[in-house]
Amino acid sequence: MTTESVSGNSLLRQSTATSDNDELYNSRHWPKLEGAILLILQQNPGQFIPISYEEMYSTVYKCVCQQYADKMYHNLIELVTSYLRRVAEELQLTPAEAYLEKFNFAMAQFFQAVSGIVAIFSYMNRFYVTPKLHTDLKKELWKLFTNLVADNAFLFGVIEEASSKPFGVDPQIMMSIIKGLHSLNPEFSIRNPVLFARFIPNILPPTQCDQLPSLIQEDRLLQENLVTSQGFTREETGKKRSGEDFQGR
């Protein structure tokens, strides 16, 4: 057998193996991962759908070893991007009075999902995303949510309006949103530094003496809002929830 024949047979075997791997990735590996990702993205905050993370991690490991890390990464980004665009569209149809609550739910849902996705793709992150792309999977997923969902003028307009009204929004929801936005992008605080400073330390410059009265007043109003939002009354004890005095009668 000539050298050319041996070389040709070797190339043919490599081509056949590559074709088989392509078929395996497209028909089995990625569909399995895609289904798990969609389940993780759609689970409610605090609830966890039973998924075999060990099986998913093993699938990612096989794909990376078979040189599919680049394709798998871009498939993942495309899938999450498509999902977040749908989330953004749903938020656009939400009335202003319900917008913050729905946004807070979507953000909490996504933060939880990112934890699960990063766990599944940790091998890809370690051996492809970090050394080849010089970034981090969690950072890239958060960036998608920031660009597609969080960074919009309407959201910050609703936040500003709600924060200017007594009981405009549940203080717990506002706190969750502000802390979440700051985690996504600390520069969001520039858009409303006074509001962000209520929940995030060291946002504003050091306080001057002449600012103390207004800050004390703001703190008092915030505490009153928190007390009222939790259902407490201003009765003599100051510790009863509304309706508690009727229980046990």
Image: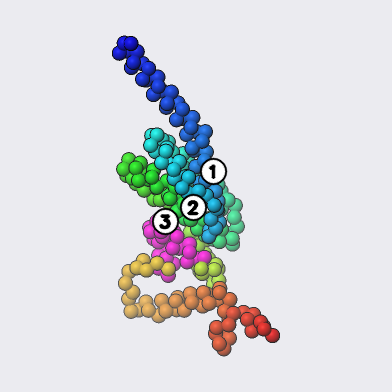
Q: Which residues are magenta?
A: 173-198
Q: Which mark is residue 35?
A: 1
Classify the position of the C terminus by image quarter: bottom right
Identify residue for label 3: 184
Could you say where residue 192 lies in the image, as x and y percent from the top left? 43, 63
Mark 1 to mark 3 CA distance (whole Å)? 26 Å
Magenta stretch secondary structure, dominant: helix
Label 2: how many Cα within 10 Å (few below 14, some 14–19, many 20+): many
Label 2's element? Answer: helix
Label 1: how many Cα within 10 Å (few below 14, some 14–19, many 20+): few
Label 3's element? Answer: helix
Identify residue for label 2: 113
Classify the position of the N terminus by image quarter: top left
Could you say where residue 243 lies in the image, as x and y percent from the top left? 64, 80
Label pair 2/1, CB-CB below 8 angstroms: no
Q: Is residue 227 above or below residue 82?
A: below
Could you say where residue 92 lies in the image, as x and y percent from the top left? 56, 52
Q: Residue at x 57, y 88 (%)?
A: 236
Q: Earlier in the sequence, mark 3 or mark 2?
A: 2
Q: Residue at x 38, y 45 (%)?
A: 123
- The answer to whether residue 82 is magenta is no
Q: Amino acid at mark 1?
A: Gly
Q: Amino acid at mark 2?
A: Ala
Whether residue 151 is visible here, answered yes or no, is: no
- The answer to whether residue 191 is magenta is yes
Q: Residue at x 51, y 46 (%)?
A: 37
Viewer-closest of 46 and 196: 46
Please indicate whether residue 198 sits to the left or right of residue 88 in the image. Answer: left
Dot in front, 3 or 2: 2
Label pair 3/2, CB-CB below 8 angstroms: no
